[in-house]
Image: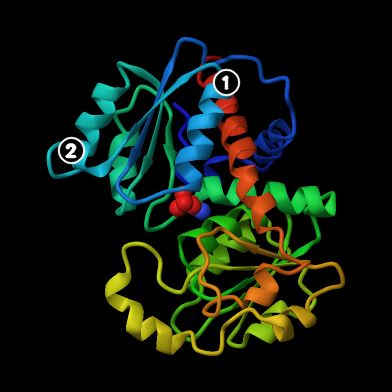
Amino acid sequence: MRHFLDVDDLAAPELVEVLDRADRQDHGLPLHGKGVALLFAKPSLRTRHSCEMGVIQLGGHPVSVRPDEIGVNDRETPADIARVLAGYHALLGARVFAHADLVGMAEPAAVPVINLLSDDAHPCQALTDLLTMRQVFGELQGRTVAWIGDHNNVARSLALGASLSGMALRFGCPEGYGPSPTDIDQFLALGALDVTVVHRPEEAAKGADAVHTDVWTSMGFEAEADDRDRAFEGFMVDDAVMAGAHDGAVFMHCLPAHRGEEVSATVIDGPASVVIQQAHNRLHAFRALAWWLAEENHR
Ligand code: CP
């Protein structure tokens, strides 16, 4: 059974195949008459709507479940949830806190499990980010992506996908918030052209084709918010940071954003920003992934 718990669950040619499908309209109705369970242990705007509409466009019926309706590890174990839902649904998507919960669902699941965000990874967001950069640049190979801020779940999955796509990675993170040496080895092993870690945002953005950031405190890390605000002071992506990027560079953010914290309003609402195209691509990327997984698991 093929699951999608992080981007490197796809080989590089499979990643290209999914991105190609995101730009296609000939998907047909591969989920006709089938259900897709979408579990949310955390809030969501983009993920819930893009997944539900993607399933509907493939002919399926999405069933979104709020945290109080299931209680992962509280009312039921991840394994029991997955075993039961696999009897009703063709796919199971889940947004959880602990990544181990997804692994616990995937292990016994008789249907593909899709990570809709965990503390470690946000691979559906990464598909969208790669798709958006490919739409802007034509191809990803050889381009440079900069990540400014926390090397969080979104950054990790983006870096895996960018590595599989042959991109160069530049991280601008405060000390203690960047990728580990193990992460860097993994990016290089997957095909990253180059990996650079610096501690100033201007330096990270220098020469980049796309500058990404995210909130300084991700969902589930609220207790660290004060420490993080102090650590990330000076890491806002503003016009001065973007000025050092490559000509035609784009600004990207998975949203929701905090204007005046990790990004200035002049950048996120300015001409270099592609954040709304990026958000809309969540639909196309998820539809492509669900289409590919449905076919791949019925060979
Ligand atoms: N980017 C993202 O995952 O948005 P939501 O949290 O609103 O789903």
Report whether 111 appears left or right of 147.
Answer: left
Q: How far apart are marks 1 and 2 (CA)?
A: 30 Å
In the rendered structure, the answer to whether residue 17 lies left or right of residue 110 reads right
Quarter-of-image position of residue 64: top left
Q: Position of residue 193 (x, y in %)?
A: 73, 64
Circle 1 residues within 10 Å: few <14, some 14–19, many ≥20: many
Residue 29 visible in this rendered orientation of the protein: yes
Q: Which of marks 1 and 2 is in front?
A: 1
* Residue 58 picture location, percent across and down: 57, 20
Question: What residue sits 36% from the left and 51% below the top?
Answer: 43
Label 2, on which residue?
77
The kind of residue tagged 1 is: Leu
* Residue 164 visible in image: no
Instruction: Name the secondary structure under disc 1.
Output: loop
> Image check: 99 left or right of 281?
left
Chosen colour scheme: rainbow
| Element assignment for label 2 | loop
Residue drawn at the location 44% of the way across and 26% of the way down: 1
Decide if residue 279 is on the left or right side of residue 267. left
* Residue most extreme to the right: 247
Question: What residue is pinned by disc 1?
Answer: 58
- Quarter of the image for the C terminus: give it: top right
Mark 2, other Cα within 10 Å: few <14 / some 14–19 / many ≥20: some
Q: Where is residue 112 in the image (x, y as percent from the top left)?
A: 43, 28
Rendered position, 235 above or below 83:
below
Callout 2 amino acid: Thr
Q: Residue at position x 37%, y 40% from top?
A: 94
Name above or below for residue 218 compared with residue 109.
Answer: below
Give the percent coordinates (x, y) of residue 72. 21, 42
Q: In this view, does 150 lie above or below 97?
A: below
